[in-house]
Image (cartoon, rainbow, N blue to C red):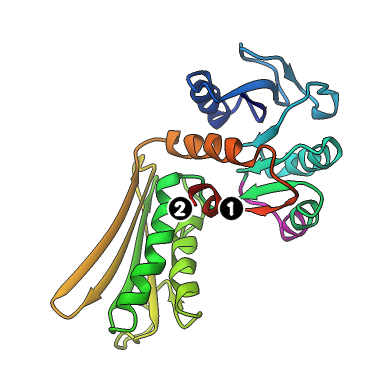
Amino acid sequence: MVRMIMHGCNGKMGQVITGITAADEEIEIVAGIDVVDNRENPYPVFTDISACDIKADVIVDFSTAAAVDKVLNYSVAAQTPIVLCTTGLSEEQLAEIQKCSKKVAVLKSANMSLGINTLMKLLKDAANVFSPAGYDVEIIEKHHNQKLDAPSGTALALADSINEARGGVYEYVYDRSSARKKREKKELGISAVRGGTIVGEHQVLFAGIDEVIEFKHTAYSKSVFAKGAVEAAKYLAGKPAGMYTMTDVIG
């Protein structure tokens, strides 16, 4: 049984993960960390991670960028592997994560969904078939009307998977209204849609002559990201120091 600390346990994702682990016989949350202890949880909750004296095999972080520095320090000091799911980190924090990964196992991914990460793997193979054959590549992402960034980090990660497979030949294009011209062959178009309560939808098109191949992933709830984080935690427990991604989890 993997023993886990849930950092950010009283947030939305922390509570979803709490529910998922309760039904999973391979992992259990032995302690939670949150700035406010305002929920009933089936484990003790600490408002300061430095006060947590419960031994665990792994930490899952779904908190805020402001709280990441402290949990990283704890992870290194306690030699406890950490799955980092918090987004919006600064360049300084990203650099610190790299430093910490030399001392403890750290897993970080742009998207924790098992489906998205499997899609990224499939897209590399697809790109190596369709790109040399002259197919155009377009990505369309859709999210709720409260999302601040565009395009999404996941859309960029999908684009990066394709571009990495092709040796970085593609140039990302986000807006075609500013120039009246034909599409260049090495463009990779990324379009963003914002509306309603769409959790997340990503569509990748390889468009050739008289043929379109479409890859699509739709998230109907945030549970897909929570499930991925739990699987990542089970994978990372016991791993040596190093930087890991969801690609390692799915194999």
Rendering coords of residue 18 (x, y %)? 55, 23
Rendering coords of residue 120 (x, y %)? 43, 59
Closer to the chain start, of discs 1 and 2, is 2
Could you tell me if residue 191 is visible in this image?
no
Is residue 126 inside the magenta stretch?
A: no
Q: Quadrant location of the N terminus?
A: top right
Name the mark on residue 245: 1
- Decide: few, some or many residues near mark 1? Use Cα within 10 Å; few <14, some 14-19, many ≥20: some
- Decide: few, some or many residues near mark 2? Use Cα within 10 Å; few <14, some 14-19, many ≥20: many
Callout 2 amino acid: Asn
- Left or right: residue 73 versus residue 162 is right
Taking depth in this image into account, of 242 and 70 the one nearest to the observer is: 242
Callout 1 amino acid: Thr
Give the secondary structure at mark 1. loop
Q: Are marks 1 and 2 in contact (CB under 8 Å)?
A: yes
Q: Residue at x 64, y 48 (%)?
A: 107
Vertical position of residue 226 compared to residue 27: above or below:
below
Taking depth in this image into account, of 100 and 94 the one nearest to the observer is: 100
Spatial CA span between label 1 and label 2: 9 Å
Residues rendered magenta in the picture: 87-95
Rendering coords of residue 50 (x, y %)? 85, 29
Residue underneath mark 2: 117
Give the secondary structure at mark 2. helix
Name the mark on residue 221: none
Q: Residue at x 63, y 51 (%)?
A: 88
Vertical position of residue 19 compared to residue 142: above or below:
above
